[in-house]
Image (spheres, helix red, strand yellow):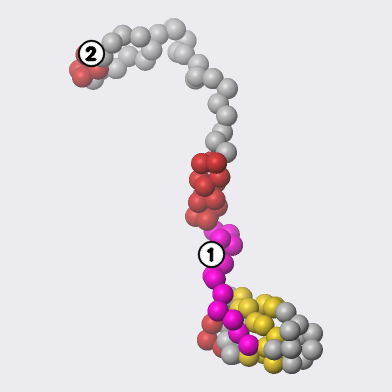
Amino acid sequence: MPLYEFRCAADCGRFERSFPMADVPRSVSCPGCEGDATRLVSSPRLGHGSSSAMTLLDATKRSAQEPAVVPGPPPRAASGRSPVTNNPLHRRLPRP
């Protein structure tokens, strides 16, 4: 169920309530003074997901600001040579 934000008419402040989308009232009673509180138009909370897709998006965004530190290049093959390729286009490249 989505969260909706309400503001008390007697200046008690803002508070949130959860309602089904089909049954959202325009006003509710204030938990502080039992007065009338009207519903506000607020921004959606899109960043509070718990799905695997949201976790992946968060990790991708975080890696842009805090990239993982690599200790060095990967280890070479046991023979000390680069892997052999059979692609004829690679013959034109300079040898390491």
Magenta stretch: give its range: 38-51
On the rendered structure, is 9 left or right of 24?
A: right
In the image, residue 21 sits, relative to residue 44, either above or below, namely below
In the rendered image, which residue does mark 1 sit on? 46
Give the residue at the far right of this rendering: 32
Which one is earlier in the sequence, the residue at label 2 or at label 1? 1
Which secondary structure is most common in the magenta stretch? loop
How many marks can you see? 2
SS category of the residue bearing label 2: helix
Residue 65 visible from this viewpoint: yes
**CA gap, disc 2 to disc 1?**
51 Å
Q: Position of residue 17 (x, y in %)?
A: 66, 80
Q: Residue at x 54, y 20 (%)?
A: 72
Crowd class of label 1 (few under 14; some 14 to 19; many from 20; radius 10 Å): few
Q: Residue at x 70, y 78 (%)?
A: 15
Q: Position of residue 57 (x, y in %)?
A: 50, 51
